[in-house]
Image (cartoon, rainbow, N blue to C red):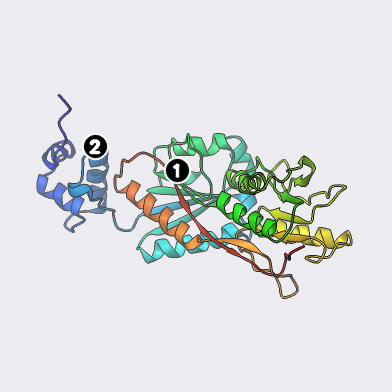
Amino acid sequence: MPPKKPTMRDIAREVGTSAVTVSKAIAGKPGMSDELREIILKKASEMGYEYPHGRLQPREHLEIGILIPDRYFESDSYYAEIYKRLVRKLTDLGHFGLLELLDARDEKELTLPSLLTTKKVDGLILLGEPVKAYYRKAAQAGTPVVFLDFYDEQANADAVAGDNTYGTYRLTSHLIRNGHRKIGFVGSIKATSSIMDRFLGYYRAMLMNDLQVREEWILPDRGATGGIVKPELPEEVPTAFVCNCDMTARMMIDLLRDKGYRVPEDISVTGFDDYPPGSENDIPLSTFRIDTDGMIELAVKTLLDRCAGDRKPFGRLVVSGQPVYRESEIPV
């Protein structure tokens, strides 16, 4: 016989309170301390209590940690912008966002953040991809975790990511339709899951059009510690480059101009993310704009559901976007 499903009375017996109090706690009704409500909800989750009609009851005023590897976080960086929007979204829902930066030493030594070790937070959003051993350890710490902008199918955590493969497939296909046949990719393929997927989108478009992917046209843009480094141009330069992000694309444009090439008259360049916007003197980039707000909303909802006791299998949720064609690329 299958095991008996726990009832509110079973939970009340374990906690040492009444079934009425358990019912109020699960329904989110007043009449008890936040501490008692937390004890009841935690016990309900531990016992595998199934909410009526599959309904989850998120608690009010959760403390949500946001952990970002230090190397990704600068005042005008893409992840700094996502962090601001994350905090705004949590605040709008009545929750609190607590930031902690992960420095290189703690990442290397697999030292978990104080947000987790001190049990300060109810859930954690890990924004930006640290080393694999680190994020897998964080996912096993006992606190609900959502990976944002990267994924790992073997980690005990949900993930929300942009449709990176589709994005660079669209950009590369657009260049091919415009007559480009010699197209390179700029990005350190194994640095992050996002860059890998963006490379695969480029690679797929090239294969689908029977075009050669030359090894010397795959240019790394990250150093050993994950920081951005200037690529080196190959002896024969392609007519177009698909870059893994807008920051790299702008760096590529500067490099090409320093070498005497005109962009886009001689060489076309595309980016990814549609961030940062660039200055008035920068050439407007063709790029792929992920629905960042959609990613944030989905990541927050997924984490709040986990905090409320959602026990479905972990998975990856993908948010798409649209290509934006501007002045950094032209037909050949």
Q: Is residue 52 left or right of residue 332?
A: left
Q: Nearer the viewer, mark 1 or mark 2?
A: 2
Question: For residue 282, which quarter of the picture?
Answer: bottom right
Q: Amino acid at mark 2?
A: Gly
The residue shown at (58%, 55%) is: 167
Can you give x and y, in whole percent of width and height, for residue 37 in the image? 23, 49
Quadrant where the image shows the N terminus:
top left
Spatial separation of the CA atoms under disc 1 and disc 2: 23 Å
Q: Secondary structure at mark 1?
A: helix
**327 relative to 235, above or below:** below
**Residue 121: in sight, yes or no?**
no
Q: Secondary structure at mark 2?
A: loop
Residue under label 1: 116
**Residue 185: in sight, yes or no?**
yes
Residue under label 2: 48
Question: For residue 189, which quarter of the picture?
Answer: top right
Q: Is residue 148 left or right of residue 181?
A: left
Q: Amino acid at mark 1?
A: Leu
Can you give x and y, in whole percent of width and height, for residue 207 in the image? 66, 44
Q: Earlier in the sequence, mark 1 or mark 2?
A: 2
**1 relative to 126, above or below:** above
Can you give x and y, in whole percent of width and height, for residue 286 in the image? 66, 64
Nearer to us in this view, 158 or 49: 158
